[in-house]
């Protein structure tokens, strides 16, 4: 029979399950390897082909490391809170836990069909009461340490949805999904003081083996700026106004002050003449989100009617209010230096404010027309004149400090983390608001605090969160003081569980502690973490923050949770649009002479994200039905480098499936028995060399996550093995072992046919002899018009074409041929290259 994944894949999946092949023991004597996927949100849509990409990559590494003798922790779980189940509950009354359970079942079934080597005994969901308990416990610890606090913050409030929205969900004052109006509202919210960890979150990035791009995004998000805080006296009262600047060297060029519309001093400094205008302006500014204000290109603002004094030169600086200054950064007030800052320049021009030059601009720059934002020599700056910008910054800070007018300051862009949501389907806060006004934590031994069942999952008509509907639950008694108390009705955001789930996998059933210290020491940190680049900032930053808090508490022993991070690239797909821009179904499109047609009409092809509305979604179940899980796995790894985006092509799956068919025929005959060509013959020197080279490359490639090139090597070796009449058993077995991490079902089946009684999951990974794996090098003669001119060392096995390519990259050869007209090139593999040239 031929290769039949439908027969062998379910069989091996059952075998692995029944034998608990991948159950991980806490065997502290063995070297460990913890390889983790970013656990999925089990949506109602089921798995898409993007999921198996990362999961296959981690599975290859997990299987490979087991074969290398590591004790491998490779778990899977569910990031199971999330808005869709709650929306569904609002519509239908079905409890989100029921929807979530169904979705988890679907996901798990789909994932199991892919033959991943997860230790399912460690499965967890963030919605499990036993998990919630410890999420809430961490919150209590944050609260105890003063890292969780309540504050009135300006939030994006959508009255129609009855909830707060994230900045990313709002555009032009509307909820992007529905177009419903959004207003800025001050609301009491729970905040986590991530800013207290800004410096460590920044510094500790240096030691991580993470993509540079992700590190850069985190650095940017944390946004460290070095500068100074400068005190300005108000002309009338002498009261002090503080600003933050990164350019203290430009102090002599500061000509006006700008306050953020929310700045507490705004109304105090505004004169009665200006009161109305300022009030109208600040009210209007409140409707815009900070993102919009930061992007705002116009220069709106109003004068308050009063002045501050520039301590450098005693010049009177008018105080303005403008929305390009944000309350949440620095001090919410700036000294404007229009000569050397673009936004200040634009504002000064729009409002007729003075522009002066204090950094010498190049001759072609007229400072009145455009700002000079670069460095240079200081002019008109009293004691700083003549200094260069960098020295002047230091000198300015010293000058300010001597006079008590300011000090150096480091400012982070990072804000505290808004940690409450007005939702039902999230962890309740283990917090009581006591009748006497005290905010008290629930006792640890009363956790978990579970959300009550509700008849309705909508916010209340008053706009309170859904939990406020459960009056009996909300009204309670503080067990310590016996005073009446109300429960917190906000819930935690979906991020909470994903901040620490990786710890729980190392000790998922512990009822006494979040994690046993010995297990933590052994398993942590995660050695390899693979997931989508969309988590480059928030999830990874939040998880790092919690980890550091747990580190300070002594719960974990490493400063960082994830040693190596890798982002898989997105799997895209072809889509087709007609001339009107309407999407067509790909199965209706035919290709003719390089054009795409639906009927007679020409359509355009593009590569885009998969989406239902583009008809280009590929369902992994269908691919498995048609080709098997091993083909799907292999194809996703063969599409290209793991970290780049690449388009799905069904023909590619067919291609790797043919490869697996050939592999089948190497080992299996027509009667489903071992192919008689496989025999105990000694490999020829060429075969031996090929075997050792393939082991070396596949090993190196797996270590470097270059799975596509590893597969190419396997294909090369399989072609040679297939062509042999006598196939040395040692080479065939080596090949099967190398294939095992990629196509585990097929490899297990072949291993069994080769006479082995046990799973190859823990068989020893093949080793190579470096001498045999070496590329053989030889010296090639380089002739010009038949005369020996030079010699070049290169790989012995080069074909004529690649020999020519290689020789031409040699600098001496390039030099020899420069300016000459090459009429003919002759390459004799293994010997020489001859160039026939005319001057
Ligand atoms: C004077 C100055 C002169 C500035 C100059 C820049 C150039 P980063 O690098 O992002 O930290 N700034 C300070 N607080 C602000 C706020 N709340 N809203 C808007 N802008 C604010 O930027 C720091 C600079 O951004 C500060 O330095 C300040 O303008 C402005 F030639 O002060 B600067």
Image (cartoon, rainbow, N blue to C red):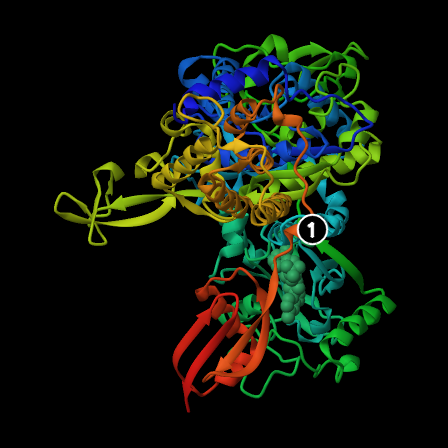
Q: In percent of the image, x 60 and y 14: which residue is there?
A: 451
Q: Where ligand 1 lies, by quadrant? A: bottom right
Residue 704 horizontal side relative to residue 723, left or right = right
Residue 449 position by quadrant: top right
Nearest the eye: 672 or 437: 672
Q: Outermost residue, bottom direction?
A: 839
| Quadrant location, the C terminus | bottom left
Secondary structure of residue under mark 1: helix
Residue 643 horizontal side relative to residue 557, left or right = left
Q: Outermost residue, left direction?
A: 600
Residue 161 position in % (x across, y down): 45, 28
Nearest the eye: 259 or 543: 543
User: Considering only vertical position in the picture, is 194 above or below 75?
Assistant: below
Residue 302 position in % (x across, y down): 53, 60
Residue 148 position by quadrant: top right
Q: In percent of the image, x 70 and y 20: which residue is there?
A: 508
Label tally = 1
Q: Is residue 413 visible?
A: no
**Residue at mark 1: C-beta within 8 A of ligand 1:** no
Nearest the eye: 82 or 533: 533
Label 1 Cα crowd, 10 Å radius (few <14 / some 14-19 / many 20+) = few
User: Considering only vertical position in the picture, is 638 above or below 595?
Assistant: above
Residue 484 horizontal side relative to residue 43, left or right = right
Nearest the eye: 478 or 143: 143
Q: In percent of the image, x 69 and y 15: which residue is there?
A: 448
Residue 248 position in % (x across, y down): 73, 69
Query: Which residue is the site of mark 1?
Result: 770
| Quadrant location, the N terminus | top left
User: Considering only vertical position in the picture, is 642 above or below 49?
Assistant: below
Q: Is residue 679 visible?
A: yes
């Amino acid at each position: 029979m031929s290769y039949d994944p439908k027969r062998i894949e379910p069989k091996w999946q059952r075998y692995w399950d029944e034998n608990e092949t991948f159950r991980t023991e806490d065997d502290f004597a063995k070297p460990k390897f913890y390889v983790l996927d970013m656990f999925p949100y089990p949506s109602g849509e089921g798995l898409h082909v993007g999921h198996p990409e990362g999961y296959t990559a981690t599975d290859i590494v997990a299987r490979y490391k087991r074969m290398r003798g590591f004790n491998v922790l490779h778990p899977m779980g569910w990031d199971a809170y999330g808005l869709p189940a709650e929306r569904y509950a609002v519509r239908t009354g079905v409890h989100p836990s029921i929807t979530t359970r169904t979705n988890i079942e679907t996901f798990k079934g789909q994932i199991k069909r892919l033959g991943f080597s997860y230790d399912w005994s460690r499965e967890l969901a963030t919605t499990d009461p036993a998990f919630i308990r410890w999420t809430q416990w961490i919150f209590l610890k944050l609260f105890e340490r003063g890292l969780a606090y309540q504050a009135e913050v300006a939030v994006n409030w959508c009255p129609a949805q009855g909830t707060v929205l994230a900045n990313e969900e709002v555009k032009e004052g509307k909820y992007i999904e529905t177009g419903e109006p959004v207003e800025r509202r001050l609301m009491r919210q729970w905040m986590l003081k991530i800013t207290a960890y800004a410096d460590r979150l920044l510094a500790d990035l240096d030691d991580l083996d993470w993509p540079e791009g992700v590190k850069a995004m985190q650095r940017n998000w944390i946004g460290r700026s070095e500068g100074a805080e400068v005190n300005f006296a108000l002309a009338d009262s002498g009261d002090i106004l503080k600003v933050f600047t990164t350019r203290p060297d430009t102090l002599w060029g500061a000509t006006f002050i700008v306050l953020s519309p929310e700045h507490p001093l705004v109304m105090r400094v505004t004169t009665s003449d200006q009161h109305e205008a300022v009030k109208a302006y600040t009210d209007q500014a409140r409707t815009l989100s900070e993102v919009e204000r930061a992007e705002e290109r116009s220069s709106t603002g109003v004068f308050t009617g009063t002045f501050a004094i520039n301590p450098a030169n005693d010049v009177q600086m008018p105080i303005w209010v403008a929305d390009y200054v944000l309350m949440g950064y620095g001090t919410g007030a700036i000294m404007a230096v229009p000569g050397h800052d673009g936004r200040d320049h634009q504002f000064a021009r729009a409002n007729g404010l003075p522009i002066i030059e204090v950094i010498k601009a190049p001759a072609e720059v007229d400072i009145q027309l455009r700002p000079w934002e670069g460095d240079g020599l200081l002019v008109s700056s009293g004691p700083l004149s003549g200094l260069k910008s960098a020295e002047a910054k230091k000198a300015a800070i010293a000058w300010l400090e001597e006079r008590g007018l300011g000090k150096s300051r480091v400012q982070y862009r990072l804000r505290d983390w808004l940690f409450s949501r007005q939702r039902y389907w999230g962890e309740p806060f283990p917090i009581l608001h006591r009748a006497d006004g005290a905010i008290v934590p629930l006792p640890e031994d009363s956790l978990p605090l579970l959300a009550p069942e509700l008849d309705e999952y909508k916010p209340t008509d008053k706009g309170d969160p859904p939990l406020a509907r459960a009056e009996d639950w909300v009204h309670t008694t503080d067990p310590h003081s016996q005073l009446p108390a109300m429960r917190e009705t906000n819930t935690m955001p979906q991020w909470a569980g994903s901040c620490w789930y990786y710890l729980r996998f190392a000790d998922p059933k512990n009822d006494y502690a979040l994690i046993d210290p010995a297990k933590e020491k052994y398993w942590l940190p995660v050695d390899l973490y693979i997931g989508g680049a969309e988590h480059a900032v928030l999830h990874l930053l939040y998880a790092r923050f919690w980890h550091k808090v747990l580190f300070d508490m002594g719960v974990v022993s490493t400063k960082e949770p994830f040693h190596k991070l890798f982002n898989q690239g997105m799997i895209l797909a072809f889509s087709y649009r007609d001339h009107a821009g309407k999407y067509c179904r790909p199965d209706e499109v035919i290709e003719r002479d390089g054009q795409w047609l639906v009927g007679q009409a020409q359509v355009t092809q593009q590569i885009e994200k998969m989406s239902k509305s583009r008809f280009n979604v590929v369902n992994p179940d269908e691919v498995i039905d048609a080709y098997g899980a091993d083909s799907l796995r292999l194809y996703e790894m063969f599409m290209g480098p793991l970290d780049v985006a690449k388009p799905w092509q069904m023909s590619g799956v067919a291609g790797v499936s043919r490869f697996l068919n050939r592999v089948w025929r190497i080992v299996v005959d027509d009667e489903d028995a071992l192919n008689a060509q496989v025999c105990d013959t000694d490999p020829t020197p060429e075969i031996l060399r090929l075997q050792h080279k393939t082991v070396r490359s596949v090993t190196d490639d797996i270590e470097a996550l270059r799975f596509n090139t590893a597969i190419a090597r396997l294909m090369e070796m399989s072609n040679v093995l297939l062509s042999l009449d006598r196939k040395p058993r040692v080479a065939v077995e080596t090949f099967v072992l190398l294939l095992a991490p990629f196509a585990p079902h097929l490899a297990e089946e072949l291993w069994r046919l080769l006479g082995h009684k046990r799973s190859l999951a823990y068989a020893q990974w093949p080793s190579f002899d470096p001498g045999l794996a070496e590329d053989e090098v030889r010296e090639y003669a380089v002739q010009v018009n038949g005369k020996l001119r030079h010699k070049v060392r290169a790989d012995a096995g080069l074909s004529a074409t690649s020999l020519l390519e290689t020789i031409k990259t040699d600098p001496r050869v390039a030099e020899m041929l420069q300016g000459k007209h090459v009429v003919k090139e002759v390459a004799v593999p293994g010997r020489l290259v001859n160039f026939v040239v005319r001057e």
